[in-house]
Image (spheres, grey):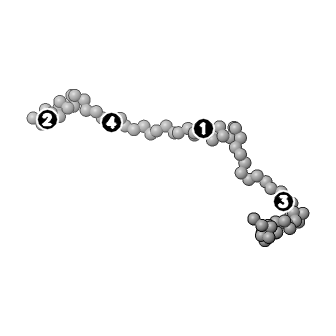
Amino acid sequence: MSDSNPVNQEVEQFNKQKLKKTNTQEKNHLPTKEGSLLQSTPPPHPLPARLPSPTIPTSASVFCATLSLL
């Protein structure tokens, strides 16, 4: 690139002394070791609701149902 480029000329003429001083504060803090351990531990789940156990026909009830069909 040649030095006749207007952008290059502006960069060379730029005066950094005219810039204002600014104070920056970090807003996105990195997690600590303790914080990452707390986040990696899943919260305890509540106990599942107790569902009624499925009724399985016994051989006696099947036998009685069969007799009633006769």
**Disc 3, SS:** loop
Q: Which residue is mark 3?
A: 22
**Disc 2, SS:** helix
Q: Looking at this rendering, what residue extends furthest in the left direction?
A: 70
Residue 26 percent coordinates (x, y): 76, 52
Q: What's the distance in space between the residues labelled 3 and 4, CA to CA?
A: 71 Å
Reading the chain from its start, which is encountered first: label 3 or label 2?
3
Q: Which residue is mark 1?
A: 41
Query: As drawn, is 23 to the left or to the right of 66?
Result: right
Q: Is residue 8 above or below residue 51?
A: below
Q: What amino acid type is highlighted by mark number 2? A: Ser
Reading the chain from its start, which is encountered first: label 1 or label 3?
3
Query: As drawn, is 11 to the left or to the right of 33?
Result: right
Reading the chain from its start, which is encountered first: label 2 or label 1?
1
Residue 4 percent coordinates (x, y): 79, 70
Of circles 1 and 3, the one toward us is: 3
Reading the chain from its start, which is encountered first: label 4 or label 1?
1
Query: As drawn, is 45 to the left or to the right of 68?
Result: right
Pointer 3 and pointer 2: residues touching (CB < 8 Å)? no
Q: Which residue is mark 2?
A: 68
Of circles 3 and 4, the one toward us is: 3
Q: What's the distance in space between the residues labelled 4 and 2, CA to CA?
A: 24 Å
Q: Which residue is mark 4?
A: 54
Residue 11 percent coordinates (x, y): 82, 66
Reading the chain from its start, which is encountered first: label 3 or label 4?
3
Q: Residues within 10 Å of mark 1 (few under 14, many from 20)?
A: few
Reading the chain from its start, which is encountered first: label 4 or label 2?
4
Residue for point 60% across, 37% down: 41
Q: Is residue 47 above or below residue 5?
A: above
Residue 8 occupies quadrant: bottom right
Of circles 4 and 1, the one toward us is: 1
State which quarter of the image contains the C terminus. Answer: top left
